[in-house]
Image: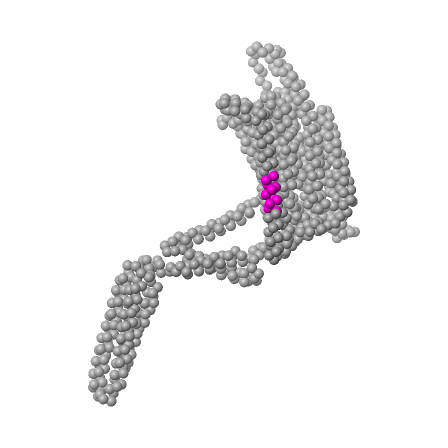
Amino acid sequence: GPEVDMHCNTARRGNSNSRSGSKVKEEKPKKGQARRSKAKEKKKVLREQCEEECRQDEEAPKCSKNHRNEKAKTEERGDFKRKTKDSCDEERNHISSDSSSESEELSADEEESQEEKDVLTQEELEKLKEAVEEKKKLIANLRGKPWPMSKKLVTLRESQEFVEKYEGALGKGKGRKLYAYKVMMMKKWMKFQRDFENFRTACIPWEMKIKEIESHFGSSVASYFIFLRWMYGMNMILFGLTFGLVMVPEALMGRPYGSMPRKTVPRSEQAGAMDFAVLWDFGGYAQYSVLFYGYYNNQRAIGWLKFRMPLSYFLVGVGTVAYSYMVVIRTMARNANRDGGGDDTSFNFSWKMFTSWDYLIGNPETADNKFASITTSFKESIVEEQESHKDENIHLTRFLRVLANFLVLCCLAGSGYLIYFVVRRSQKFALEGLENYGWWERNEVNMVMSLLGMFCPMLFDVISSLENYHPRIALQWQLGRIFALFLGNLYTFIIALMDEINLKRREEEVVKYNMTVWQASLYNGTVDDNSTTSTIPVDPADVPRGPCWETMVGQEFVRLIVSDTMTTYITLLIGDFLRAVFVRFFNYCWCWDLEYGFPSYSEFDVSGNVLGLIFNQGMIWMGAFYAPCLPALNVLRLHVSMYLQCWAVMCCNVPQERVFKASGSNNFYMAMLLVILFLSTLPAIYTIVSIPPSFDCGPFSGKKRMYDVIQETLENDFPLWFGKVFSYASNPGLVLPFILVMILAIYYLQSTSKTYKAANMDLKKKLQTRQVQGW
């Protein structure tokens, strides 16, 4: 009947609830699994009994329908209803008691089961770990897959989501949270490293400008700007040393201007000491300032800090040269390590064709630069391939190269003689008085050297067209010839300057005698040493003084630097900018095509600009001891040159007709810089060791030699035994063997590096052979 159906449905719902509860409980820990299985068996037996009774009772009224009356049927229904109700209530009570007992048994393990409810089996854990590792490998190698971009993006997104979702599940038990925390921190650290690398790249001065120039003009032009940036960094260190340890202490703690003769403009020069022409020649108040050697006092300790000014001046001069040697040699060694030997031209065009583009570029301007860079690299590779298969007439080529070298030697000899003649002529002008001559006569030496440095490289470039060298080799020959030109001009200038130093020293002897007579005139006309007469106060501007040859040398180098800088900038504006403006606007109304004919747009002169930087730096090294302001002037010059030349090369120049790939290490530039560093320090060392300092100017006045300040410091500030050890260590008997051992060690290391380089080349060839055989 309907009542029976209702009660059976209630029992079934109870049973289904018990089944659902048992399914949930199956996910509980294995510790209470035995008890749960027994409870399930009991519930199953009770459910079967209840269903059997319900079926029997449902069939009973149908069987007795024809044999019982209506009253018996009613009584039977009542009895069956009570019986069924009692049996179902008993079953529900039994099930609820089992459930409550089971919940009581599991309550003790509730916390542990809650922590371990999501733990995977060891097999599932290994599979998940393998899947995560495969997704990571797929993310790393996705760029190399030959798939469409849409598929790559979808795969990348799905793989990243999978890794982020399941990577933390690789932990075990209570260490899962710690493992997830470690994974999160590792991801944050990797992101921080990537962001910091991007920030560091953005902080590199002029990096984006150089990349843009490289993309349009090739690596040969970009190598010049990289070299200029490196020179700027080195000069910043030199400027910091001289400014922080020499100029600032003298300006803050030294005696002020006007307190002594060496710090005061002479009375005869005070009228025009502030004129622009005088200051442009670094005379007047500029001469008697911290910019030059003669201003510094020979007082052993200055200020309340007792700063050792003469010692600091000497050590800074030596330290700048030592630091320059160290940084140049270290850069050369690092560049040599990057160049592991061998060529990288195997399958060169295939690599460029299929792997050059960067698919992560999202900026249109960056994409344009990358496109231009790939185009330029193809041009460089094509030139390299053409030069490697070029046939030439060897006898004609040798004759033309010999003729070109003979013409270059004639130019070098002529320029050297011209500089020597001009320097001797300027000495004659100096003896007669420069105030009697015009601007050209006063600046004739500087202007002639600057003009030779501007026009001789152009002549060498014309001569080099006869030789038919590879563009890279032609650049090296051009650099070598300009190097010889600048070096010859510089040493000719130094030789003439040494003659002028000798004239100043002879003049100094005369001044010494005159000062003796002048001092005698202050003591009532007597020179008696026992006289007790008080001296007459004299203004420092009226005291006679010597010529101070050190300041004269510093002034000459500063004038040379300034004139060379001005010549470079004027040449840049006239030779590049005005030429480009003329070609651009007059090309429409001219008889021939100005862009492809004469005069056309100018090309960037790599060799001339590189040698200009190198010899400018050589003059800094040579004159910084006598003019501490030179590193500051050079920093300013390099800073302005970077912006001005970057603008000029992008706006006024065109790429070379034969774009070639520059050497990856730039060690040729560094080798020339090392040579000019060595040759520049020789004259400075000679003057420090051989020529006595001036008697009335500079921090070493009153000493026989400039290096005597070291001995004085050892005697006064160090124990006696330390001075003896230092004297023994500086003995030539120990110094010469030490130098010999250093030379032998350098030779051994160089031989070892050549051996390793040859071994690397052999291994590279073997790997290439195996790779080709595998294909």
Q: Which residues are drawn in magenta?
A: 751-761
**Vertical side of 517 occupied by 88: above or below:** below
- Residue 274 visible to the viewer: no
| The image quarter in which residue 296 lies | top right
**Residue 760 covered by magenta stretch:** yes
Where does the image place residue 433, in percent across and percent down from the top left?
A: 71, 25
Residue 148 is situated, as x and y percent measured from the top left of the image, at 57, 62
Q: Which colour scheme is used?
A: one colour
Above or below — where is 102 with respect to 47? above
Residue drawn where x is 60% and y is 45% of the image: 759
Q: Residue at x 73, y 40 (%)?
A: 460
Q: Which residue corresponds to the image point at 69% horizontal and 42% vertical from the top-left? A: 476
The quarter in which the N terminus is drawn is bottom left
> Which residue is at the front of the view, 764 or 229?
764
Q: Position of residue 46 (x, y in %)?
A: 27, 73
Residue furthest bottom in the image = 66
Q: Is residue 306 left or right of residue 295?
A: left
Q: Quadrant of the C terminus?
A: bottom right
For residue 62, what is the image quadrant? bottom left
257 with respect to 117 (left or right): right
Residue at x 75% of width, y 48% of height: 392
Nearest to the observer: residue 763 or residue 685: 763
